Amino acid sequence: MSRREDAAVMGKPLAQSFAWLERAQRVIPAATQTLSKRPSQFARGLTPVFLREGDGCRVVDVDGRTYLDYSMALCAVTLGYNYPAVTQAIERQLRAGTIFSLNHPLEVEVAERLVELIPCAKMVRFAKNGSDVTA
């Protein structure tokens, strides 16, 4: 991006981002579910507050601007957003169903593979987030 293009983007207000922020503040404490996404963690007026999509290492905010996502979500997203093989596998599983009331064979298969790949691992416990793991 040229300096002139960069200046044009920087001068454009984040109208949609702040509109979503106002809505979020009415119904979500601190406007977010996690500390790392909290708007106060970023430069107000320069950083978007809401993203609508991602592909590879780039994300698009709700105002339509594209950014290089340096923080890469809430974890190491080695393959980037919308990696075709991962997206296709997710779509297949969504069609087959999710969040069953009983175990799914995929849980066992993934656990077996992790035990095989990680020399010190004897068993595997899946969790939704870091808070669950540390608790």
Image (spheres, rainbow, N blue to C red):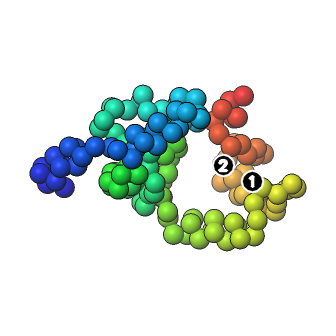
User: 17 or 104, which is in the foreground?
Assistant: 17
**Mark 1 to mark 2: distance in Å?**
10 Å
Disc nearer the start of the sequence (1/2): 1
Q: What is the quadrant of the N terminus in the image?
A: bottom left
User: 135 or 35, which is in the foreground?
Assistant: 35
Q: How many badges with numbers are in the image?
A: 2
Q: Amino acid at mark 2?
A: Ile
The residue mark sitting in front, 1 or 2, is 1
Question: What is the secondary structure assignment of the residue under circle 2?
Answer: loop
**Relative horizontal placement of residue 12, taking residue 83 as reference (left or right):** left
Extreme-right residue of the structure: 102
- The location of residue 65, given as percent across then percent down, is 32, 54
51 up-or-down from 44: above or below: below
Res. 132 image quadrant:
top right
Q: What is the quadrant of the C terminus in the image?
A: top right
38 up-or-down from 127: above or below: above
- The location of residue 53, given as percent across then percent down, is 45, 57
Residue 34 seen in this snapshot = no
76 up-or-down from 26: above or below: below
Q: Amino acid at mark 1?
A: Ala
Question: What is the secondary structure assignment of the residue under circle 1?
Answer: helix
Q: Residue at x 29, y 38 (%)?
A: 46
Residue 41 seen in this snapshot = yes
Residue identifier under label 2: 118
Q: Residue at x 43, y 33 (%)?
A: 39
Q: Residue at x 42, y 60 (%)?
A: 56
Residue identifier under label 1: 111
- The location of residue 120, given as percent across then percent down, is 69, 42
- The location of residue 58, given as percent across then percent down, is 37, 56
